[in-house]
Amino acid sequence: GISGALAIGLPPVLNFGTPELIARIGPPVLRGEKRICLAISDPFAGSDVSNIQCTATKNPDGSYCVNGVKKWITNGMQADYFATAVITGERDGHGAGAMSMLLIERACGGVTTKRIKTSYTAAAGTAYVIFDNAQVPAGNLLGVENKGWPIVMSNFNEERLGMAIGGNRLNRLVVEECVKWASQRQVFGKPLISQPVIQEKIAHMIAQVESVQSWLELTVHEANVDHNATKQRLAGRIALIKLQQTRVAHFVADNAVQIFGGRGLTRTGMGRVIEDFQRSYKFGAVLGGAEEIMASLGVRQMLKDSPRARL
């Protein structure tokens, strides 16, 4: 939770904050003395980011007064700083044109957090965040007022790529556990892995996991060669990689439980890794953009970038 929130909460400050804000916030967060999180989703808007309801009104001195709530905020329980999407302007249908990003400090008051119990891990510090007349200095504005939409979007690519990398590492761990278990488990006088039906399950698991891994390595290489590509050309591909990784996780979890049997549903013992995975893997299919949104984004960018070919 702490490292994940750092990876998505600090970049908006480093990329769009003033030099003074970066110098004040960056070092203590990187040293681990302070915690930060990204606060985008609220109870009214998940994937539909432009529909957020949290608002910020300007005070006479140019500072902001924030009111509203945020939900499912990773590391919100521990955070000292909240990189927060708020509505600062007049909505004209689509809320994107009225959105700003503010760095809200818990120490300034008006911030309350309540723990949300999830199916994945309490270490994530997932929180329901309440802003009740939270005061934010004018210097804590990230970027330009009412131009927060591009900041939110710029952060999503790295977040989604990181989620796919971490998610596929868990996929590989589960496959490894299945191979170990099937090799030692004896059924009908033979190792479980000698059964053709088990071999087929493991074969398909390996093939799908390694295909995601290859796609990830190719994309990370291209992003390292041209970082700006992740904001433009690779956005659709990253969305599809995240989609594919979570679909593969579903396949892996399903087959892993079948291979482990009752142990795959037991929180302790040899099947504890499988039980934890099958209970929590779905978070990757929702957080950072739901699978359906990822599919739509990938196809829409393909149509935008591809020649208008006809049969």
Image: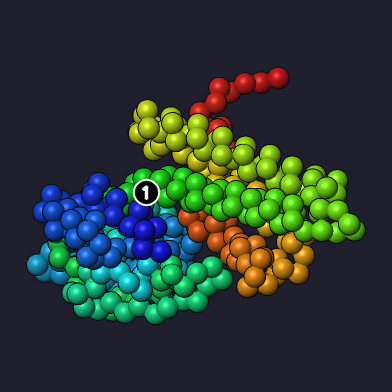
Rendered location of residue 48, percent (x, y): 48, 58
Residue 211 image position (x, y, % from top left): 62, 37
Q: Which colour scheme is used?
A: rainbow
Q: In which quarter of the image is the N terminus?
A: bottom left
Above or below 212: residue 305: above
Q: How crowded is mark 1: few (under 14 residues within 10 Å), some or many (20 or more)?
A: some
Circle 1: residue type: Asn
The foreground one among 142 and 272 is: 272
Quadrant in the rendering for residue 21: bottom left
Residue at 43% from the left image edge and 70% from the top image edge: 123
Q: Which residue is drawn at 39% across and 58% down?
A: 4
Residue drawn at (15%, 70%), measured in percent from left and top?
A: 59
Residue 33, x across and y down, in percent: 22, 65
Which quarter of the figure is the C terminus placed in?
A: top right
Dot 1 corresponds to which residue?
155
Residue 171 in view, yes or no: no
Residue in view at x 46 percent, y 76 percent: 116
- Drawn side of residue 221 relative to residue 180, left or right: left
Farthest residue toward the right?
Answer: 188
> Which structural element holds mark 1?
helix
Q: Position of residue 173 (x, y in %)?
A: 59, 52
Q: In this view, does 309 lie above or below 284?
A: above
Is 279 above or below relative to 95? below
Residue in front for this viewpoint, 240 or 92? 240
